[in-house]
Image (cartoon, helix red, strand yellow):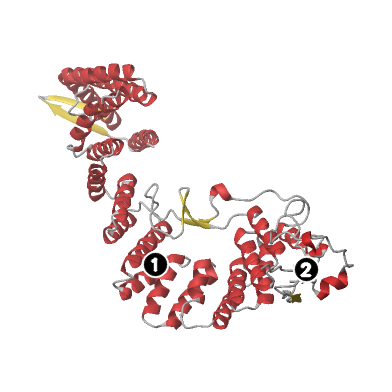
Amino acid sequence: MTTVLKILFFFITILVLGFGFSWLADRPGALSIIWEGQLIEMSLMVAATIIIGIVAIVMAFWWLFRTLWTSPHSVRRYFRARTRDRGYQALSTGLIAAGAGNAILARKMSARARGLLRADQEPLILVLDAQASLIEGRHDEARRLFQQMSEDAETRELGLRGLYVEASRLGAHEAARQYAETAAENAPYLPWAAKATLEYRCRAGHWDDAIRLLDQQRVAHVLDRHEADRLKAVLLTAKAQDQLEGEPLAARDHALKALKLAKDLVPAAIVAAKAYQREDNLRKAAHTLEQVWKLSPHPEIAQAYVRSRSGDSAVDRLKKAEKLEALKPNNIESLLAVAEAALEAQEFDKARAKAEAAARIESRERVYLLLADIEEAETGDQGRIRHWMGQAVKAARDPAWVADGHVSERWMPVSPVTGRLDAFEWKVPFDQIEGPIEEGNLSGAEKALGTLPPIVPKEPEQVPRPSARIIDEEAPVVIEEKPEAAANKQAAAPLPVANGERSIKADDIVEPFFGRPPDDPGVKDPGRAAPEAKTRLKLF
């Protein structure tokens, strides 16, 4: 842009001079000058040319005089610039070598840069020395250099960063926290300082300080609006959880503020509903849960909504679950909520229908376990119960609160592994994504329903009848069979007994254990459709 302006100025100057000479040529005249008795006459054109020549000669002499006068300084400046360029070249080479891990070259370039540049005027020399010390494992020297940089206003942020990293490496968490907070207070726009300080304050439960720091980050445009609103909603929810027991009104207000910033934040809705329940305001509690349920159906929302009032009967809870289903139809969480409530209300047909519909939408472990519970409560058929339990083993695992590989039974604002804020997500754990691969064209639910064994009716309990016995202390003992056993079997010949005192039929002999299946209540003996009562002997 500057070159274009210079060329434009040159052309304008030429045009002005040409226009001036043309104007003088069109208006001829004579110029007379008497100088010391001499008369000098010339035309205006010649006079103008002489004046312009004199001005040019004066300017040329002035430039030459100025150049000669300032030449020593120019020479010194030339050599100084050359030295500075060589120093910066060495510094650049040293930083590249330090980044590549070449400590020898980094030290060599650092020494050369110190010889060509002044260390007090170029802070990058300290940075190069610190990086070289870290590569060589001289951490004490590196910390000293970082401390020196933190005392200079120009390199304070870089020095605090280095001290924070070193303190974290040594496990000095309190020192690292102080360095991060110092950097965050002076420069809230630094992402690493703000993040570290925010994590420390969240771990300590200092929610007000964390919220204030987050607001500073938002003003400094470190975070965009959506991310800042989400993180602030998480902090407000965590604060509301801590205040729920002692200050339910404050907990309610903070939870509602969190819901305004993040409308689908499930933990905030649960805290707000619990706070409303403590005020006996069940209508607002239900309304809050319903609004979040429409955006994000969650089993904890369903449980809090269905069991919001302790005095409700099972039928009342079923009606609430059906209301949730009406708000979010054809959803697996809605169907499971209705199925569980129907099972509790002993409405087995409805519970089974909703659970099977949920299985067709998504085959989960929780769905098949619920079907097993329904089967046990309604029919008690062990075969069908084992069938559903087997399907649960093969099905995909249920979602849970997961953060950095850690699975938790409840939501927490901070990850216990890394300390990251808003790390927990409701999803399937990464190591339990799916069960075995099902073959065939049918889905898992259809295949499970198609292979379900039929219901085996329960056998009526048989009450043994007492057998007829004739006992005489003096006479021989005679023991007869039961009437039903005698009708089904032919009379067997009596076995001889010593001294002829007793007569026992062959069917009354107790069979030995060996040679037949064990007496397992879960194993049916095919040779015995109806077990027969044995005749008991009473010997005197």
For the N terminus, the image quarter is top left
Q: Amino acid at mark 2?
A: Glu
- Residue position marked by numbered label 1 in the rendering: 258
| Number of residue marks | 2
- Residue position marked by numbered label 2 in the rendering: 532
Q: Is residue 57 left or right of residue 22?
A: left
Which residue does the image show at 47% across and 83% down from the upper left? Answer: 311
Name of the residue lying farthest toward the right: 490
* Mark in front: 1 vs 2: 2
Considering depth in this image, is 62 or 338 the residue closer to the camera? 338
> In the figure, residue 202 lies in which quadrant?
bottom left
Residue 389 position, x and y percent, is 65, 59
Q: Are marks 1 and 2 in contact (CB under 8 Å)?
A: no
As drawn, 110 above or below 388: above
Disc 1 from disc 2: Cα separation: 71 Å
Q: Is residue 453 left or right of residue 64?
A: right
Q: Is residue 396 left or right of residue 285?
A: right
> In the figure, residue 354 lies in which quadrant?
bottom right
Q: Characterize the local packing of mark 2: few (<14), some (14-19) or many (20 or more) Cα atoms within 10 angstroms.
A: few
> In the figure, residue 211 lies in which quadrant?
bottom left
Mark with earlier residue (1, 2): 1
Residue 125 position, x and y percent, is 25, 26
